[in-house]
Image (tube, rainbow, N blue to C red):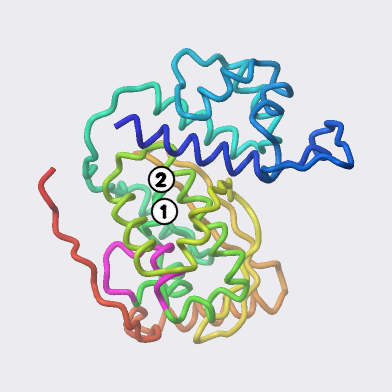
Amino acid sequence: MRDDFRAEIREFLGTRRARVTPEQAGLPTYGGERRRVTGLRREEVALLAGISSEYYTRLERGNATGVSESVIEGIAQALQLDEAERIHLLDLLRGAGTTRPPRRRPAQQRVRPAVQRVLDSMAGTPAFILSGRGDILAANHLGRALFSPVYADPVRPPNNARFVFLSPHATEFFRHWDEVANDTVAMLRAEAGRDLYDRRLTDLIGELSTRSEEFRRRWAAHNVRMHTTGVKLLHHPVVGDLDLPFETFPLPDGPSQFLLTYTAEPDSPSQDALNLLASWAATDDGIERSAPANDSQPADSGETPD
């Protein structure tokens, strides 16, 4: 099972090497030199990291036994990794050096009633509990109204990644769809680095890889990202355009659960639209039914024996 992590290490480090040029790394170049690789060579990474070329080559091939924190930090600096990428590399190296059980279907993630009450108390703020896979585990009423196109998918729980890549309505709902698509894949890649043996996650990645060329192309890039704050530009089928700053907060309950909230700038058109959405949601008894029809079919959600 460690071979999965070793393959991920090889591909991740290879793609990181390819994006850093010798000039960016501060290495001398010579006009007549013909380079057969894009980016840095392995020996150049080793030089920058202060380790032998043989050791780095073994590490890139997934031999993570006994690798020290100082070596990891040296490689991270040589490859100019950001914080999300450094954490991802640590996750992969940890997985490669650990004997793990076969892929498993983890227990269904639950949201405590007290957490749901917190969501419901945030009446003027769309709020959600999401898993690391992008499953919407819980939401308040305004959250369900805001994401009514996502809830139109009959598969439960609703999943952001499935909506982004498989719904024909995603490019209209997310006004900057390319950016959302890149972020979605980068977050799934980071989650996979934390646990390659989560069967629900690997099933989701397999489904998206099979059905979406856009997903396959982005997945092959091995980009990872921490996406904890920003602004989402949405087009809601009822109230139109909204520019909503968002914040995410990790929860202590369960694996990879976090609170996601959206707000609007005071006295802005987006605040007016959010107020209108709240009024519509308060009078509409079928938020999910009022969302655009979704052409996808429910995936088989039955449990399979391990």
Q: Which element is circle 1 on? A: strand
Does residue 127 show up magenta in the picture? no
The quarter holding residue 144 reads bottom left
- Read off the residue under disc 2: 257
Residue 165 versus residue 113: which sits nearer the camera? Answer: 165
- Tag 2: Cα neighbours inside 10 Å, few (<14), some, or many (≥20)? many
User: Could you tell me which residue is drawn at 45 percent across and 67 percent down?
Assistant: 143
- Amino acid type indicated by mark 1: Leu
Q: Which mark is residue 229?
A: none
- Amino acid type indicated by mark 2: Gln
Q: Which element is circle 2 on? A: strand
Q: Vertical placement of 273 versus 159: above or below? A: below
Q: Residue furthest left?
A: 305
Q: Position of residue 125 (x, y in %)?
A: 53, 64
Residue 230 versus residue 124: which sits nearer the camera? Answer: 230
Query: In the rendered view, does 191 fall on the left or right side of 202?
Result: right
User: Could you tell me which residue is drawn at 44 percent across and 25 percent down?
Assistant: 94
Query: In the rendered view, does 278 fall on the left or right side of 144?
Result: right
Does residue 155 show up magenta in the picture? yes
Residue 22 versus residue 182: which sits nearer the camera? Answer: 22
User: Could you tell me which residue is drawn at 59 percent across and 44 percent down?
Assistant: 15
Over which residues does the magenta segment extend? 153-167
Image label count:
2
Q: Position of residue 166 (x, y in %)?
A: 40, 72
The Cα–Cα distance between marks 1 and 2, rounded to whole angstroms, is 6 Å
Q: Which mark is residue 130?
A: 1
